[in-house]
Image: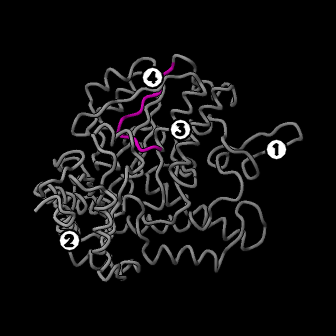
Amino acid sequence: MTAAPLEPAEVDGLRAQFPILAQTVNGHPLVYLDSAATAQKPERVIAAEGAFYREANAAVHRGAHTLAAEATERYEDARAEVARFLAVDENEVVFTSNATEGLNLIAYAIGNASLGMGGAAAAPYALRPGDEIVTTELEHHANLIPWQELAARTGATLRHIPVDDEGRLWVDAAAEVITERTRLLALTHVSNVTGVVSPLEQLVPLARAVGALVVLDACQSAPHGVLHPRALDVDLAVFSGHKVYGPTGIGVLYGRAALLDALPPFLFGGSMITTVTLEKAEYLPSPQRFEPGTPRIAQAVGLAEALRFVTEIGMLRIAATEEALGRRLLDGLAGIPGVRVLGGTDPDGRVGLASVVVDGVHAHDAGQFLDDRGIAARVGHHCAQPLHRRLGATASLRLSCGVHTTAAEIDLALEAVAGVRPYFGVAA
């Protein structure tokens, strides 16, 4: 299913809703091309979070007074908004601090099941020596290290689906990596280095054929298109609110209801129990069993407003707009001498994101050159050292689009990237 890209006038209207974009940086109008790291916030998201504190601040699920009831209603309304965004049920939505916590929650819950916690219901998800966890060479550290630690705690083996020299997952090799011993496949939906969309339609069936759980890191896909975990046939998925124009400090874990209810908790405390004695406790079903303590209430309210913001624009239109910007970006980068695009310059199956290595110039120097011209771009390894190593780079300069990005801003960035090597004296 496709949709028409946003018209320039529509993008201008959206830009007016982002107060931060009105400022200048180093004497130039701000060009924000670092949405993959964190998205800027429209005024309505900032206002929604502030309104909660001004009008309804109270702990949820506890007090009997009016404010407590109002706070609980706004918090659960936020959960319902997330459920609509993902096309899932409300009890399948767990609020976390971010995607990293969501992935750690899954890993620790499976680790606890492997220790015998959760009884017979959790036993099917326990890992033992000889079992295998499969990730990919694309993963950022948040979807790699928790599985390394889970393998170390359980005796399971960690394996990886390799990428080819272009940085795209090698599907033929995946068929050899995913075997009858595979119990879990954890992979990114979209690479935060190359912007390439993973071929889930080919990889998920391989995991299904051997009865493995599928965990999807949707950090870089949730802001850029339709994200329906059930349609993708994944068991668990995570994303961070701050990358979808929401506040920092809030993330989402989706899980199939039966799976979440079977897995033992990861953190323990108040608000997640049914009964407690001095010797033991019994736990509520999901999502409460994974949300102990006072949750991130204002952040959840802000996230819900952010999801309403992108939903009103239309996720299909956002995807079409950013795909066009990504093609413009890749086409432009392909014509700049001395610039190598990680993942190649084929625009098919990618979002509006590209990372480049500028020959003879360190990524940090290139980033500073752009910043001097008011252009905010990411530099470093983007928490994906293994992928950078595989592609022969220690660091790169990353340009990433948001819903407010214009074609003129892409052109300004391309002009700046083309000027890096001459400025540092490594090209005429």
Residue at 57% x, 55% y is: 97
Mark toward the viewer: 1 or 4 = 4
For mark 1, what is the residue?
Answer: 275
Residue at 67% x, 45% y is: 289
Q: Nearer the viewer, residue 26 or 56?
A: 26
Query: Looking at numbered disc 4 in the image, what kind of residue is underneath it?
Result: Thr
Residue at 30% x, 60% y is: 400
Across and down, in percent, residue 326 comes to 21, 58
For mark 4, what is the residue?
Answer: 182
For mark 3, what is the residue?
Answer: 146
Q: Earlier in the sequence, mark 2 or mark 1?
A: 1
The magenta stretch spans which residues? 131-141
Residue at 32% x, 49% y is: 193
Query: Looking at numbered disc 3 in the image, what kind of residue is underneath it?
Result: Pro
Q: CA distance from mark 2 to mark 3?
A: 39 Å
- Would you say the residues marked 2 and 1 are in contact, meaning their CB atoms lie under 8 Å apart? no
Mark toward the viewer: 2 or 4 = 2
Identify the secondary structure beneath mark 1.
strand
Q: Earlier in the sequence, mark 3 or mark 1?
A: 3
Q: Earlier in the sequence, mark 1 or mark 4?
A: 4
